[in-house]
Image: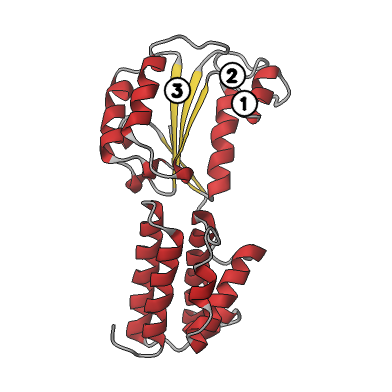
Amino acid sequence: MHLEGGELGERVGLALWWAALINCEHVDKSGSGAVPCLSCPACLRIGAGMYPDLVVLDGREGSIKIDQIRELRPLLGEPPRFGRRRVVVMLEAQSLGIEAANALLKSLEEPSADTCFLFTMPQRERLLPTLVSRGWVLTLPWPDPLRPLADSVREWAVSLAEFLDSGRGWFEKTSVKGALDMSQALELVLACQKALTEHLTGQEKSPLGKALACLSEQGVFAADELFARSQEALQVQVSPALVADRMATELYLLIHGIPD
């Protein structure tokens, strides 16, 4: 199964919920119309990340490499050690390298009846088409760009707005090691997209929305493209601070009409 859309936390939560569903001791083998109890030993161990038949390769921590896939493949030929099914979860599978993704194909072409795979990603287009074609795709509701920002992201959005106005303070903030992670950077891009929507509808309420109000018509199109490129760069594991710095710099140039 390929799980796309929603927010990062929703995708991760649903992946674990699904692993619990097909191994819950109070759900029959078909799983039809049932939900996991979340209280039996299997559900509790899956929730704690201590279930022997749950394998998680976490793309949030960096690229999923071919060596990890090679280590996984011998396990796929064995029956589950504890539960009904072995579940292999590839969190944020857009982090799969080309070699790693190709190495997975044989296992997906000749699946074991006792093993299930679940891939999570923002959009299915982030995966190789040959991987997507071998499973079902479930699409969660897309995030609402107008929802309130988390406090941690709001702080970054305010700092970015101040930089776009004065040209100061931003790089001192992003240069702190580990200050901005990928999840926060993605949320910051979403905040910029929300601010652009505010500008286009004449409802500039946030500091970022007011900063982007200075964009020309051509600048609006350039900013929209910039946000899409920034999001794509983050999905392929480019440094969050580097992406944020590039985005902030290009926005500043657009707003102030400075040729890049």
Locate residue 184, reporting x and y percent: 54, 59
**Residue on which the image places disc 2:** 23
Describe the element under mark 3 as helix, strand or loop.
Answer: strand
Pointer 1 local density, CA inside 10 Å: few below 14, some 14–19, many at least 20: many
Pointer 3 local density, CA inside 10 Å: few below 14, some 14–19, many at least 20: some
N-terminal of the two: label 2 or label 3?
Answer: 2
Position of 174 compared to 104: left or right? right
N-terminal of the two: label 1 or label 2?
Answer: 2
Locate residue 217, reporting x and y percent: 36, 85
At label 1, the amino acid type is Ile
Question: Answer yes or no: do the residues labelled 1 and 2 have beta carbons within 8 Å?
Answer: yes
**Hey, which quadrant is residue 34 in on the image?**
top right
N-terminal of the two: label 3 or label 1?
Answer: 1
Residue 4 shows up from this direction: no
Distance (Cα) linking label 3 and label 1: 15 Å
At label 3, the amino acid type is Cys
x 56%, y 72%: residue: 157
**Location of the N terminus (image quadrant):** top left
Q: Residue furthest right?
A: 39
**Residue on which the image places disc 3:** 116
**Location of the C terminus (image quadrant):** bottom left
Q: Is residue 169 above or below residue 243?
A: below
**Residue on which the image places disc 1:** 46
Position of 124 compared to 183: left or right? left
Locate residue 81, reporting x and y percent: 53, 10
Count of picture labels: 3
